[in-house]
Image (cartoon, helix red, strand yellow):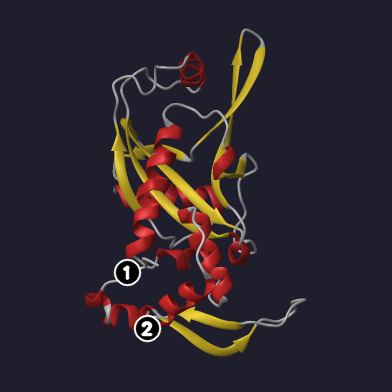
Amino acid sequence: MDPILIPNVSIDCVVFGFDMQDLKVLLVDRDIEHNGVLHHDRKLPGDLIRKDEELDSAACRILHDLSGLQNLYLNQFGSFGGVNRLKSKERDLIWLKQIDHPEERVITIAYYTLINLTSAKEEYILRSNAKWTSLDSLGELAFDHAEIITKAYSMMKQNFKVNPIAFELLPDKFTLSQLQKIYEVVLKTQYDKRNFRKKISQISCIVPINEKQTNVAHKPARLYMFSKDIYEKTRKDNFDFTV
């Protein structure tokens, strides 16, 4: 028996990925046929929630169906329920008719999640219609999905400064240069190398290990790890990453 869906409540997921150079967003292709012409744009991964489903469970289901991945970092950052959020663009109305969705108001609960593309690439298999796109070149999107992504990015930047979520986008073992790179890319800034490393030395949960890079053309750099145990023990001191 097919699950019973609630037609007025949906989940949309903003999936951020980092390939050690660029911040990307995972988008799903959408084809719209109108008057014999096939139009193409993209949308966020999402779905209506099921009658017997919790919100977090729905987000996990959507992400698993999309990528095969489980136990991803999830942050519910807002809801979007404008009266005309589904009706402001003609192509959105045409697409809703194509999928037999009733023309009703839908409130979406939005999440963002983080994936390190370098480490996870052997672990996930994307649906054929899902593609990574640079955050700076998303193009035209469905409904209010551009607004949702903008809000997700803004919330993520705030969290980057006070929570250790950057490590969700890095390999388990990373160099200080890689750590600096992710902060510069996400926060759109440049750090002085000496000041950055001085700040890192003051954060006890970023731990140097007795290993160096391998298979690199330059001098191998020392590797570091994020210690969740140390972070939990010192959490009262806050994770302040203001360089």
Estimate how packed mark 2 is, as few (under 14), some (14 to 19) or many (20 or more) residues with alpha carbons within 10 Å: some
**Closer-to-camera residue (105/238):** 238
**Closer-to-camera residue (234/27):** 234
Estimate how packed mark 1 is, as few (under 14), some (14 to 19) or many (20 or more) residues with alpha carbons within 10 Å: few
Q: Position of residue 240 (x, y in %)?
A: 32, 69
Residue at 51%, 48% (x, y): give it. Answer: 65
58 with respect to 197 (left or right): left
* Residue furthest top in the image: 35
Instruction: State whether residue 171 is above or below residue 36.
Output: below
Residue at 29%, 21% (x, y): give it. Answer: 83
48 with respect to 238 (left or right): right
**Cβ atoms under marks 1 and 2 closer than 8 Å:** no
Residue at 43%, 50% (x, y): give it. Answer: 61
Q: Position of residue 71 (x, y in %)?
A: 43, 63
- The quarter of the picture where the C terminus appears is bottom left
Q: Which residue is mark 1?
A: 240
- The quarter of the picture where the N terminus appears is top left
Residue at 43%, 44% (x, y): give it. Answer: 13
51 with respect to 65 (left or right): left
Q: How many discs appear?
A: 2
Q: Which residue is mark 2?
A: 204
Q: Amino acid at mark 1?
A: Asp
Instruction: State whether residue 139 is above or below residue 215.
Output: above
Circle number at residue 176: none
**Closer-to-camera residue (109/22):** 22
Query: Label 1 to label 2, Cα distance in Å?
Result: 12 Å
Q: Amino acid at mark 2?
A: Ser
Q: Position of residue 213 (x, y in %)?
A: 66, 81
Q: Position of residue 109 (x, y in %)?
A: 32, 40
Q: Secondary structure at mark 1?
A: loop
